[in-house]
Amino acid sequence: MVLSTLRVGTLLALLLPSAVSFVVPSTEVRPRNLEVPWKKTGLYSGHRRRRDGSIASCNYGPQTRGCWGDFDIDTNMDEEWPDTGKTVKYELTITNVTGAPDGFERQMFHINGQFPGPTIIADWGDNLEITVKNNAQNNGTGLHWHGIRQLGSNEQDGVNGITECPIPPGSEKVYKFKLTQYGTTWYHSHYSVQYGDGIWGPMIIRGPSTADWDIDLGAMPLTDWFHATTFTANAAAVHAKGPPTADNVLSSSTPPNLTANYWFRVGTGGACDGPNANAANIRSIFRYAGADSDEEPSDDIAIVLPSGCYDQPNIVPYSKTTIPQSLPESLSLGFSDNYTTDVTQSRGLVQWLVNGNPMAVNLQVPTLQSVLDGNVKTGNNSHTFEIDEKSKWQYWILQQSPTSPPIPHPIHLHGHDFYILAQVANATWNGDISALQTNNPVRRDTANLPAAGYVVLAFASDNPGAWLMHCHIPFHVAAGLGVQFLERKAEIAAKDGFEEMGRGCGKWGNYMERTHPGGILFPGDSGL
């Protein structure tokens, strides 16, 4: 999982995410001392904090984090983790509201009456049990736990059309999963572009770290914001206008009891997905209750970066690993606007293509249900790639096609971290595997596919399930820029615990029959 352990002002850039990771699996892909039983409890380890089963005392803070006994920063969390014996429960209620986060009033969503949603806090080794209640008026929903590995709990991943059906209005779903990793991440809706209207929030899994810190200010979310709802913006984007330009950038964190005075000067010079038309108009207001507004700042430090989209390549995993060299499979990421391909000729849509087609899911029959029914569809718009090898390295190259606009795409993989073996802008992969960085490569769950270039990724097939890989710009994945890996299908079909998914899909089917018998997504929306 790509999670950050930064504690002083951890920033979550939510619509264009990029993050860092720190612990990698050993070169032995198969987890040792770990057999993953397929059972509904979601408990995969007998550890209770210490390896001998004893309870470790807990003193968590800036200078000490001894809550996990002999599990520490050197523990390979792909293979081992503590079991605290504790279940942390949250209840999240989604509602429609009229809000004005930047002073411009418009329709949006709240979670528990707030935006962003409440921060979920738990410890490494805890079990999370989160009840999501959909009190929205006309939208299905669900929550994805970004970067959480979901080892043995693929059905808890929260992806509409792949691991579940949407939660209909007036209904609820309980997500249950084990926290085998730690760090700072976030949760968000995976129902089309819905999270851009407010259905997201921070998530902190407390655990060891490589160094102490001064003070924990909590998560400091950062997001772009649109004055039109994202569904309205997405409809315009798909019907010939292309991705919209954000109207604002919001940081809605309010740390408690802050008595220092901080000065910020921020300039915006570029955008990840095209020209920044509003660079000169971006404004910010910083307010810290209780601080002395007359106090002069003690330091004046300038940090200037060229404009563009960033993915820090110099942060290497804490534990060293080596990836075997192998020739990757290829995925071509292209683009169609209006009438350039047969795929869109009859409808005049702007869509993103993978191997010539945009991805789309069936919200009423998720991929996991298709596996249980023995009716999995591959190719075309399902973009399903089957991986049958057990705990073997998988190699993939993502190449932007010459017809695609030369812009970066933040590519996110569910259920796994991956290793970045190559990442080159304005270039075409030449097939030279000797040039791949296989000695302690960077590890992520999200990485930039550079503009007009390629990225080569490797991950181990050690987590059976249906896992989405997609561009995390919501307007891009909603327009088809994604694929799904169906990993070790036979083991998925043999797993129990799918009863809740079946009940949820029954509720969604009844809702659709009553309210939207002709379908709920407009043409060109992938549903993701």
Image: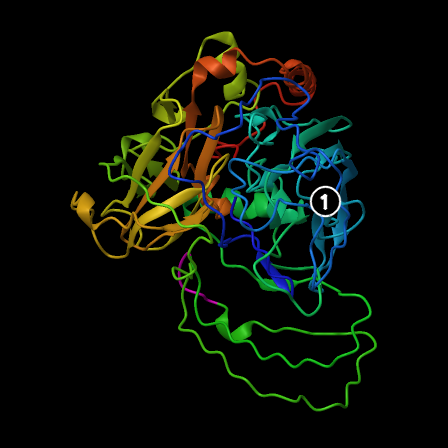
Q: Position of residue 209 (x, y in %)?
A: 60, 56
What's under tag 1, amino acid-wise? Ala
Q: Position of residue 373 (x, y in %)?
A: 51, 8
Q: Can the viewer see residue 192 in this picture? A: yes
Q: Quadrant of residue 285?
A: bottom right
Q: Position of residue 89 (x, y in %)?
A: 78, 36
In the image, which residues are magenta? 273-277
Q: Nearer the viewer, residue 509 or 165?
A: 165
Residue placed farthest to the top in the image? 374
Q: Can the viewer see residue 140 in this picture? A: no
Q: Position of residue 398 (x, y in %)?
A: 31, 42
Q: Residue at x 68, y 35 (%)?
A: 83
Q: Nearer the viewer, residue 4 or 294?
A: 4
In the image, residue 351 sits, relative to residue 40, either above or below, namely below
Q: Residues within 10 Å of mark 1 (few under 14, many from 20)?
A: many
In the image, residue 101 sits, relative to residue 388, either above or below, namely below
Q: On the rendered structure, is 98 left or right of 314?
A: right
Label the magenta part by its dominant secondary structure. Answer: loop
- Give the residue number, with chain letter if any, for mark 1: 122
SS state under label 1: strand
Q: On the rendered structure, is 117 left or right of 381?
A: right
Q: Residue at x 45, y 72 (%)?
A: 269
Q: Is residue 275 part of the magenta span, yes or no? A: yes
Q: Residue at x 63, y 45 (%)?
A: 70
Q: Quadrant of residue 144?
A: top right
